[in-house]
Image (cartoon, coloured by chain):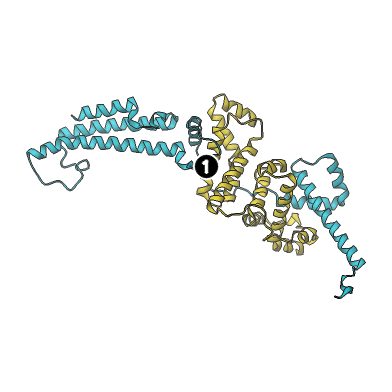
Chain colours: A yellow, B cyan
Amino acid sequence: MEHTESEWLEMYRAGDVNALGQLVEQTRRPLFSFILRMVKNQHEAEEVFQEVWFRAVKNMDTYQDRKLMSWLFRIAHNLVIDRARKKKPDLNLEESSEGMPDWHERLASGDFLPDLLTMDQDLGIRIRDAVANLPETQKAVFLMRTEGDLSFKEIAEIQDTSINTSLARMQYALSKLRDLLSEDYQQLAKG
Amino acid sequence: MNSSSNTPDPKKEAALLEQQLLLEQLLLLEQLLLLEQTGELGSEQTEQLATLATPEEISRRRAELNCLTQPLGSTDLPATPELSLERILKAGSVGASDGNEAGNEAGAAAQRPWFGSTLRIAAAITLLAGITWFALRGPQTQQLANNPEPEPTQSHLSSETNVTALEAEMFASVDERLGDLDSMLSQVTLDGIDSSLEIDPFSDPYLNSLAAALLADLQ
């Protein structure tokens, strides 16, 4: 019989260490994917992933009734930011207008809407590559939303901002993706 | 100054305003569709969504968003053999008592229990090997004092030709003891109960008794 996340948590708290294994396995792919795409280095991603669980296990007793994935992403997000700041102390993690796509035009233009029935499977790979080029805060929102399936309320809490800001960052990210993938869009529009 | 250049063009202004409104509608439409994806759309917003565009346009925008916001897939995710449950469990069992706060990033790698334990265990084995080596060297040094010969260039421990029956017996005993120690330390690592190794490997009574037994064998 399949257990729910909260049941696994209860079992782990009751002393069943195998329950923790289940929780790790359930969250491994989205969490590791998020970390890997944020730090862009497998070795570093493994370190961060270990650190996330290290901290999570240490604080499991104080963990309250929240969504586990959201909590893990919060820890991961903070660790990634800490590491980025250590690498570049003067790094500005806030939004920058530089590099913003002309999202007004992109969004308003119906020509960029792809025909999904003929969508190339490789587009997924190109989306992934384009995501790597997003500004950090936008990339974090995009990945927490798409990989972690977090709500905008949860993302806003993690980034200590408002839902509107999270939504705006997501829209910037999407618009930048449309911009980076414009060739695909144009090709599909012509095809 | 040319005052005519400052005269507003009503038609142009109206067109700009219309364009601005259209843009705001599209942005709002996309925001609502994003909230719809996460189930965060309220009932009022659901009604609002229906007024912003035709059902066909909403469907197209929704489909495009779904396409762009699908999980990126795991095809490029490398295997993560280092991320074993034992390590994480061990991290938890030792970390719970080490007093560090979750937010304390400094020295994180050095504080990782498996990392520290590995070093401590390696140090313990090295020390024991060192004790053993010196203990073995002792009788040999005495022999050499009575019967001086050139120092062999090969390591005494690795030289099979110089091993006497007595030394072979001693090596076997040492190997056995070190095997016990290695096995015990492996068990300690897996069980995550190496708190006795945190300060000084030789403060552990069992390790001490092993070391004493080793020395006794060698004397």
Circle 1: residue type? Glu
Residue occupying image coordinates x 53% and y 50%: A86
Please state if B42 lies on the left or on the right of B96 as rendered: right
Residue B180 image offset from top left, x and y in percent? 32, 30
Residue B8 image offset from top left, x and y in percent? 90, 68
Which is more toward the observer, A97 or A109?
A: A97
Secondary-structure class at tag 1:
loop
Q: Chain of mark 1?
A: B
Q: Residue furthest left?
A: B147
Please state if B157 lies on the left or on the right of A19 as rendered: left
Residue B168 image offset from top left, x and y in percent? 19, 34
Which is more toward the observer, A85 or A136?
A: A85
Image quarter hosting the N terminus of chain B: bottom right
Picture layout, residue B144 above or below residue B29: above
Which is more toward the observer, A40 or A82?
A: A82
Please state if B125 lies on the left or on the right of B95 as rendered: left
Picture layout, residue B57 above or below residue B200: below
Residue B206 image offset from top left, x and y in percent? 33, 25
Q: Residue furthest right?
A: B10
Please state if A68 lies on the left or on the right of B47 as rendered: left
Residue occupying image coordinates x 67% and y 52%: A138
Q: Which residue is mark 1?
A: B105
Residue occupying image coordinates x 20% and y 30%: B218
Q: Residue furthest bottom?
A: B2
Image quarter hosting the C terminus of chain B: top left
